[in-house]
Image (tube, helix red, strand yellow):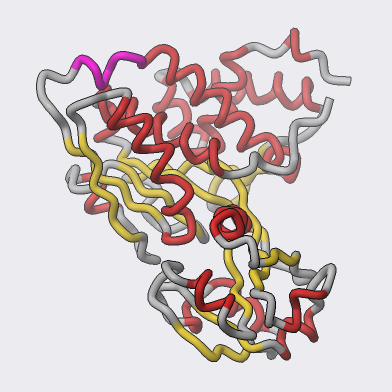
Amino acid sequence: MLDWRRIDLNNLKVLHALMLERHVGRAADRLGVTASSISHRLRRMREDFADELFVRTPTGMAPSPRMEEIAVPLSEMIASITLAVSSGALEALPQARRFTLVVPDGLRQQLLPVLIHSLVQDHAGHSLDIRVFERRSYATELSQGEVDAVISVGGDRDDRSLVERIPVACDRLVCLCGPLCPLAGTDEVSVDDYLSAAHLYSLPWPASDNHFDRLLARDGRSRRIMLTMPSHLGIGDALIASRLVATIPSSLARHLTALHPDLTIRPLAIDGTEGTVFLEASRQQQRRPEIARFKVLVETAIRTVLPRSPAAPRT
């Protein structure tokens, strides 16, 4: 059993830096220490966790499955400490500041009330500009200060030197059905039932570019999309009036069922439904205290509306 009283906070900071940088030298630069110090502390943590934690590969340090489990709760702990020591950064601004945040459509409805309370009510005078997430790199906008933070979904991109990308939380795709939908009466939606249903697609990019549809295509499968909408706005009414099913994040599904009690959530018995939500910020811009503070506020808001990672550190 791991004795958490023996864990050195500085060693946990090393794990966090390695998770972000995937490189010993860059992690050392990030923490202002030597590469040998990083290696020494990693050896200590490997002994404490009885796991390799990171494995050296041709492209850098790859996290082990155990490290992947630790990553989100570790990031949460570091964020809590950062929030405590950086409090007051927004209040100390000499004038009102407009913060720009990019948010995926599947998270915007749940997140906005929490963000407005945190930023506008608690820090009167500051304002918030929300932009719709697109499946592309935001490295240029983040580095130039045009965007302060990005909540992203999907895989990694080749802009690690400019952008810090932190895994914040996890969410899972589920089926959302109206009372007329044939899937509403099932306990769990099987692959065959899912593919035979008529679907509502509500993302701003084509299904051919959608990660889940590409996973289906690898197995020679595709869903029958009968209605395409540019966003999730209005899908509750569309589902209630039709036999269609929508595949959306579970957090959004819970939000919509609270607004439309006739809707039903059904789990999907298909691989690839779980995904990680990331928070992106410019490495250079977040050295400014107000950007660092804003980033922590956003991270805290995400964790308020999204479930924590289902995997917690084992003891």
The x, y position of residue 264, in whole percent, is: 69, 66
Corner quadrant of residue 312: top right
- The quarter in which the N terminus is drawn is top right
Q: Position of residue 34 (x, y in %)?
A: 46, 20
Work out whether 265 lies above or below 13: below
Could you tell me residue 301's position as x and y percent? 46, 36
Residue 140 lies left or right of residue 104; in this view the side is left
Residue at horizontal 17 percent and vertical 28 percent from the top: 125
Foreground of the two, 82 or 267: 267
Q: Work out which residue is located at the far top of the displayed protein and give it.
A: 5
Q: Position of residue 120 (x, y in %)?
A: 28, 31
Residue 192 appears in which quarter of the rendering? bottom right
Q: Is residue 91 magenta?
A: yes
State the residue at coordinates (55%, 46%). 60
Q: Where on the picture, by quarter, is residue 74?
A: top right
Magenta span: 87-92
